[in-house]
Amino acid sequence: MQRLKGNGVSPGYVMGRAYVLHSDDVFSVPPESISADDIPKEIARFEDALTRTRAEILGIRKKLSTQIGREHSDIFNAHLLILEDRTLIEDVIALLREKKVNADYAFSKVIRRYFQAFSQIDDEYLRERISDIKDVGKRILQNLYGEEKGALENLKEKVILVAHDLSPSDTATLDKNKILAFVTEIGGPTSHTAILGRSMEIPAVVGVDNAIQSVKSGDLVIVDGTHGVLIVDPDEKSVEDYHREEIRFTAFISELDKLKNLPAETIDGRRITLASNIEFHDEIPSVISHGSEGIGLYRTEYFYMNRSDLPTEEEQFRAYKQVAERMNPHSVIIRTLDLGGDKFVSSLDVPHEMNPFLGWRAIRFCLTRVDVFKLQLRAILRASSFGKLKIMYPMISNVQELRKANEILQECREELLREGVEFDKTMEVGAMIEIPSAAITSDLLAKEVNFFSIGTNDLIQYCLAVDRVNEKIAYLYEPTHPAILRLIRQTVENGHRNNIWVGICGEMSSDPAIAAVLLGLEIDEISTSPVVLPKVKKIIRSLSFADAKELADKALGFATGDEVREYINGRLRSVAAGLLDE
């Protein structure tokens, strides 16, 4: 038996047979000599594989277009272009003819040459195309083999997927009825894979070192997506423990489900709003099914990524309108473009920077690329007449940025008025508080907006000077650090003194124990992943507001984050037994 640790990013317990998805070694194909007479047959086999691959990709693109919209399915246009690359095709055929080797080997040799060439290009966007080439290349090889090797969409049995990472086409074809859980070697809680797992409610563990080397397809494994554990070849005791945990977890989820239609209200009547964070509008069913009272953070930069052109105003309008209508009468907070940092778009010519997280990103980018910014603002304004939309600016660091953004928004309003286009003239406008300077000057910023939403992922990173994806200093990333709690309290107090409401939309609020402290700090709205909302609601409904305030006051008095954590966990175990371990 082997017990491997990773990050639990989607809760739940599953036991089943592993299916190991090898992504890179698939290109290590041994050569097979062929006769001159076999050359036409091998070329035909290669061309047939290209045709079948093209049909598969067109099918995936069509499926995605139906499910989540054309803007996201267009990522596969790049895959189709690779399939039509005449240089690549002719190189394979030439090698096949010259060396008299099988098509599988000729193709694998040529495609590996492409990997090497692209990896040496001094252009970040082109280097990133390697993943597209690998994705397409893998499909071509599978079709050359003439078997369904590695084709997730054609799995015959329910499995637990183990992979180094999941490619776009792999993730797009995950079938919840076949994939019981998944484990990857790389990725973190905010990775696309993790977000997908949570939105599909598939138990998942990411960041498991050497998972591929430790598991073989067919091995019996247990995945604990709650605590981030993978057990390979479990012993009898582990199996018994798993069955016990599975029963308990099922009962726990069933109990939480009863809270779905109840308000997030304390025992003594203090009520707050529980909303969801989303990237794509196909997450809305999960948002609704978990009892969310709106969308507190709709990230829009994904419209701009994985495509060669910019989204039009009309395209954005249709997407925002759809979300507004489906969530009505609940509100939807649309965060304006937050590109830069770790999110790049080839069509926007954002240069590589020495310190991208401190550089030209988010509102800083939008205030200099007003053409791009105005298209989005106009689209949001137009969609606002179909529901209850709100606008939020990311990465605000001072009053000047806020005023400039509002001036541009006002220009858009005046344009639409002149054009006779309807929009919500009372739409609320807010600022994301995620930079220490914004929290410290929140008394000044509060006079310029209708609400604050505290983005704790970045606030913690910037306040504590800790790169949140650097595993060597991960121990410094402390949501319960006294500095973080004090900045939150200061922001809430300044917001309320100026009669605006204050929400929180970072991952920190997904922890029920911390959510209790946030409640005591008088946060008005908590927005997080839909799947964890029932747990947050449970802790809120288990406490009185007076108890939560006492909890927060005590927490603010400790000297270290560990002391805060120990104290709140100890206090809350007595009122919500079992909740903190899930």
Image (cartoon, helix red, strand yellow):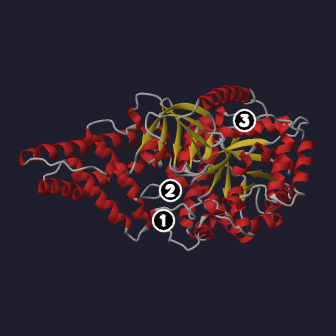
Quick one: 254 or 394, which is closer to the camera? 254
Q: Name the residue furthest bottom.
A: 354
Rendered image: mark on residue 534: 3
For mark 2, give the secondary structure: loop
Rendered-image quadrant of the C terminus: top right
Left or right of 109 in this view: 558? right
Inspect the image, locate mark 3, and give the three-letter code of the amino acid beneath it.
Answer: Pro
Residue found 55% across the figure and 52% down from its top: 187
Along the line of sight, the residue nearer the viewer: 370 or 262:
262
The residue carrying mark 1 is 348
Q: CA distance from mark 3 to mark 2?
A: 32 Å
- Please tell me how crowded label 3 is: few (under 14), some (14-19), or many (20+) other residues with Cα within 10 Å: many
C-alpha gap between disc 3 and disc 1: 39 Å
Name the residue carrying label 2.
304
State yes or no: discs 2 and 1 in contact (Cβ < 8 Å): yes
The amino acid sitting under disc 2 is Tyr
**Residue 426, x across and y down, in percent:** 73, 51
Q: Hey, what amino acid is under mark 1?
A: Leu
Q: CA gap, disc 2 to disc 1?
A: 9 Å
Q: Where is 488 relative to 532, above or below?
A: below
Crowding near pointer 1: few (<14 within 10 Å), some, many (20+)?
some
Residue 160 can be seen, yes or no: yes
Horizontal placement of 27 versus 192: left or right?
left
Residue at image point 38% right, 51% down: 24
First along the sequence among labels 3 and 1: 1
Residue 493 lies, in percent from the top left, at 87, 57
Q: Please tell me which residue lies in front, 438 or 178.
A: 178
